[in-house]
Image (spheres, rainbow, N blue to C red):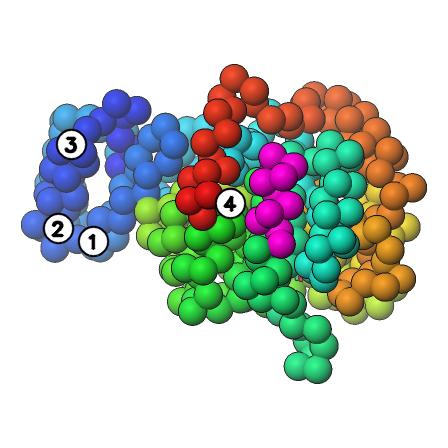
Amino acid sequence: MVVVMRGGASETDIDKVVNAITEVGGDAFVSRGKHQTIIGLVGDLTQFTELPLHAFPGVEDVIRVSKPYKLVSNDAHPRPSTVWVGDAAIGRDTVTLIAGPCAVETEEQTQAACRMAKEAGATILRGGAYKPRTSPYAFQGLGEPGLDLLHATSRQLGMPFVTEVVTPADVETVAAKADMLQVGARNMQNFQLLKEVGMAGRPVLLKRGLTATIDEWIMAAEYIAQTGNLQIVLCERGIRTYEPMTRNTLDVSAVPVAQSLSHLPVVIDPSHSGGKRELVLPLTRAAIAVGADGIIVDVHPRPETALVDGPQALVKEDIVLLRETVARFAEAAGRSVARIDQERSTGAWGRSAAGV
Ligand code: PEP
Ligand code: MN
């Protein structure tokens, strides 16, 4: 069961619901969205039937949910949600472009890649400082110095950034500087990491695991939501199939399926799915056509020197085409390309992360 609170519900209203639930032996998980708070009830349903929850002050609705996930389910949330990363929105009305280097390698490369991202019309930067690598001998990322490089570039360009965190021990360090935390495909079911990331108070980009079903992916999002953090974006990045011609197989149907089950925004990563530069624009077109709320793309000024994922990086010559492709396909899908909301933009987000 889920209790949906009204927009203006007070903390006292929320506490009253939580106390009533715990008094009858149930568990209550409070998730605070930007506009609404929802409370997931866990326990034997018969425990709650006697409670007049509808009549509690501040309660908008009480919903019986049969799906295994409650807080991220569409049943719990009347409308698709919008996630804010700094002043950049990811939601159902727009198509948001996120772009940047796969990995932070040097200051020069990071700045050049992030400038390419801005030129392409991105509102959010991406870049990995902590890299989950298949081989322990491969470049593992620069770690904290890489995070600092990304942070400095992000503030110079006035754009928020998303970066991956690979272990619970690093969550605090990464959350102190990053505007959005990424949980990578290989960590989608690292439940301790999901909980820590949820508690860090930053929006989260949750990639789908290489062999995860859509249900498992949404259940992983539910772990984050249970910590009270509903600022979650799902990212389809290709799944492992028998087909070796692409790095992974982009599951485009995951977008409408996930959107029909959950209120969370869903984006597509055409770089890690295709794994080849020449596939990125065609897959971007497919992603927007199928209704993705955004695209996350790797770019690199000199992919032949890249320490990670060079073959899939877009280069300078692709930038104008990327920009045009996103604009044209967004329009065809009845959406606008996400821009920084100047009215909402106070620049305060840049100071709040890392306190600088
Ligand atoms: C990445 O985005 O750099 C990355 C490692 O992605 P994934 O977890 O999808 O492989
Ligand atoms: Mn990569």
**Is 35 placed left or right of 141 in the picture?**
left
Residue at disc 1, secondary structure: strand
**Mark 3 in CB contact with mark 1 (< 8 angstroms):** no
The kind of residue tagged 4 is: Asp
Q: Earlier in the sequence, mark 1 or mark 4?
A: 1
Residue at disc 4, secondary structure: loop
The residue that mark 4 highlights is 179
The answer to whether residue 6 is visible is yes
Pick whichever, 69 or 312, lies toward us. 312
Residue at disc 3, secondary structure: helix
Q: Earlier in the sequence, mark 4 or mark 3?
A: 3
Closer to the eye: label 3 or 2: 3
**Is 240 placed left or right of 15 in the picture?**
right
Q: CA distance from mark 4 to mark 3?
A: 30 Å
The residue that mark 3 highlights is 13
User: Cβ of disc 3 within 8 Å of ligand 1?
Assistant: no
Q: Which mark is residue 27?
A: 1
Magenta stretch, residue numbers: 149-159
Q: Earlier in the sequence, mark 3 or mark 2?
A: 3
**Mark 1 in CB contact with mark 4 (< 8 angstroms):** no
The answer to whether residue 246 is visible is no
The kind of residue tagged 3 is: Asp
Q: CA distance from mark 3 to mark 1?
A: 17 Å
Q: Residue at x 41, y 59 (%)?
A: 172
